[in-house]
Image (tube, helix red, strand yellow):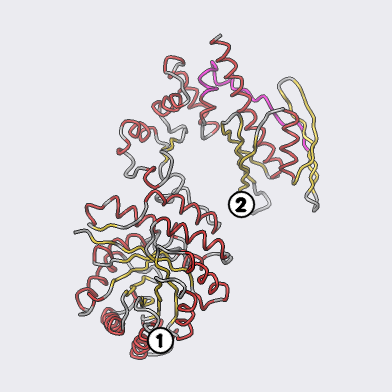
Amino acid sequence: MKEKIILFDTTLRDGEQSLKTNLGTKDKITIALALENMGIDIIEVGFPISSPKDYKTSQEISKIIKNSKICGLARCTEKDIDAVYESLKKSKNFRIHIFLATSPIHIITKLKTTLNDVIEKIIFMIKYARKYTNDIEFSCEDASRTPIKNLCLIVNAAIRAGATTINIPDTVGYTFPQEYYDIIYNLKNEVDNIDKCIISVHTHNDLGMAVGNAITAINAGARQIEGTVNGIGERAGNCALEEIIMALYTRKQNMNVYTNIKYNKIYITSKIVSEICNIPLSINKAIVGKNAFSHSSGIHQDGILKNKKTYEILDPKFIGVNETEFNLTSKSGRAAVKYHMELMGYKSNTYDINKLYNNFIKLADKKGQIFNYDLESLAFNNEIDNITEYYSVKYFNVESNSSSISIATIKLQCGNLIKLEAATGLGPVDAIYKAIIRITNYNIDLIKYRLIAKNHTEKSIGQVEIKIKYKKKIFHGIGLSKDIIEASIIAIVNSLNDIWRFDQVKKNILKNKS
């Protein structure tokens, strides 16, 4: 019979500790609601004694969350425990989470006490907390560096005192998976009252072992996993819950466990946490990274088109991602090029795939990533040399000051003509954009502007990436320059050249049909 894995999310507590600024109450409520909607069993909403703001926020969340259990963190002191109770008592379903260090290095150098005193304090504080609730979790801070005999004594005492969940954290991300397995296995076999509690694990990623350690802990008998969305947290972060969830699902025949997660809410929850916490996801982040379901290799693309399972062990739609993405680069094959042409509605008998592919490779080597509108231009122009740059920058001047009103003067080469326009805007980019619009008369929307600093030296180069919407299509532009104003202009002009070519191709197609 399959056993349930309890998912304990600490994004709002351990995750927030890694942020440069504290989250606002509204932001925390938004994340808490997303976690509840995703099906998280327990949400650790904060460390109420740490600040009046954390106390108030924990209190507000406790009034709103109904389906997930609410939890607050406390040190082994009466004041901390009282604060957790007072902030969470509006919830009918709350937990008090108490922690105390148990490893020799912490006991001797940080607490300056003895193991016996630590055990006595743990017993007293768990009994004290039980006057508020029977749902008590005790964490042995730095458990993975605590001698197993000492750990067994501590866990036994905590359970006798009334703890219903015992957390065995790898606080500094030091432990290897086999070592972690042995710790949980020994506790299961050496502590005589261990069956009276749930064993939990809280793993950190300092050596990149967080998810691996959590998996081995489950195999050894742990039934609660603590982590954060996107793996945010102290130092290198925590166990990424979305990774552990999908590992358990994908390998469910091996694990024989289950969760109550709504899988199709994983991606949107990840996006919410990333945006609110202002922590962009690495493009190669497992499960939720931009490249998690994208393919560039021609061999992989061909395999995916024949059978998705050749190179994808997960269905992206299962976690809320729209679809598999094929990046068109010089590594892509004919199959991917043909596939993209089919997506745009072009049948194979309307163009020469061999000529298109040869021109595609030439342009990809020059440009990098290729987009659908590039393919159209290549498919319906005889040679790559005919892919012309209609617009080019001849001159620009931008004046900006603290009033936020900027003036941009732009001179562009437009085919055989040179045109000059000026415009005002709310900032230099807005002024540039408006001046260029006056020259080209394109009905476009600048929907994304991103500045990337390549380095921080005198020779540093700024990279501007933009997205422009035109006739319901998205066009991409990139500009590189030591001057970010110039980089912005280049990016816009590059995208306008793509738009111009797109229009020319459409005109040619209509002309040929008529």
Residue 31 lies, with reference to residue 196, above or below; the image says above
Left-right relation of 431 to 222: right
Q: Which residues are magenta?
A: 376-396
Quarter of the figure that contains the C terminus = top right
Q: Kindly state the secondary structure of the residue where label 1 is placed.
A: helix
Q: Position of residue 490 (x, y in %)?
A: 67, 36
Residue 378 colored magenta? yes
Q: Which mark is residue 108?
A: 1
* Residue found farthest to the top: 514
Q: Position of residue 123 (x, y in %)?
A: 34, 87
Residue shown at 64%/38% (left/top)? 446
Which amino acid does the dot numbered 1 rest on? Answer: Ile
Closer-to-camera residue (395/191): 191
Residue 503 lies, with reference to residue 27, above or below; the image says above
Question: Nearer the observer, disc 1 or disc 2?
Answer: 1
Closer-to-camera residue (168/150): 168
Residue shown at 27%/63% (left/top)? 218
Q: Is any atom of residue 205 visible in this view?
A: no
Closer-to-camera residue (252/483): 252
Crowdedness of circle 1 by 10 Å Cα count: few (<14), some, many (20+)? few
Marks 1/2 in contact by CB < 8 Å: the verdict is no
Q: Which mark is residue 455?
A: 2
